[in-house]
Amino acid sequence: MDLSWMGWTIPTAIFFLSIAVALVLMIIWGIKAPQAPRLGLLRIETTPGDRLFISLLGSAFICLTWLALFGAPLWGALAVCMFYALSVFRWV
């Protein structure tokens, strides 16, 4: 199977593996310690899986905005995304 059109690089593979590992860890966490949905800052009930999805979606928009405003090195965007994800898991 020719996957050369996808531009697989080591950073791309690490990115997708990181998301896969996060999903597997969330599944294991949900099985070992089920949590009831909680009402957060947005006034909607969210589970840890919902908060992970919100974090990933928001981080994608943060990175796209960073690219539009500042260009290619995304280290600053990574820092903003980490703060955003921690905030979502804490208060949303």
Image (tube, rainbow, N blue to C red):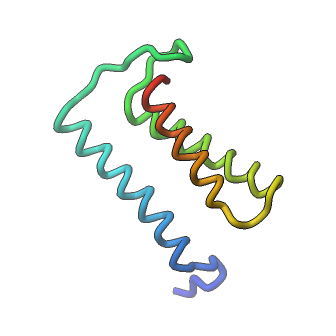
In the image, 84 versus 33, the foreground residue is 84
In-image side of 32 versus 7 (left or right): left
- Count of marks overlaid on the render: 0
Above-or-below relation of 31 to 65: above
Task: Write the residue at 49% across / 24% down.
Answer: 92
Residue 19 in the image: state x and y as whole percent: 44, 56
Residue 67 in the image: state x and y as whole percent: 76, 57
- Residue at the far right in the pictured view: 69
In terms of image quadrants, where is residue 26?
A: top left
In-image side of 62 versus 8 (left or right): right
Residue 57 in the image: state x and y as whole percent: 59, 43
Task: Write the residue at 42% across / 60% down.
Answer: 18
- Residue at the far left in the pictured view: 32
Task: Write the residue at 44% across / 14% down.
Answer: 39
In terms of image quadrants, where is residue 42?
A: top right
In-image side of 34 versus 15 (left or right): left
Residue 3 in the image: state x and y as whole percent: 57, 82
Above-or-below relation of 23 to 85: below
Above-or-below relation of 73 to 70: below
Task: Write the residue at 61% across / 40% down.
Answer: 58
In the image, 14 versus 73, the foreground residue is 73
In-image side of 78 versus 40 (left or right): right
Above-or-below relation of 1 to 34: below
In terms of image quadrants, where is residue 21?
A: bottom left
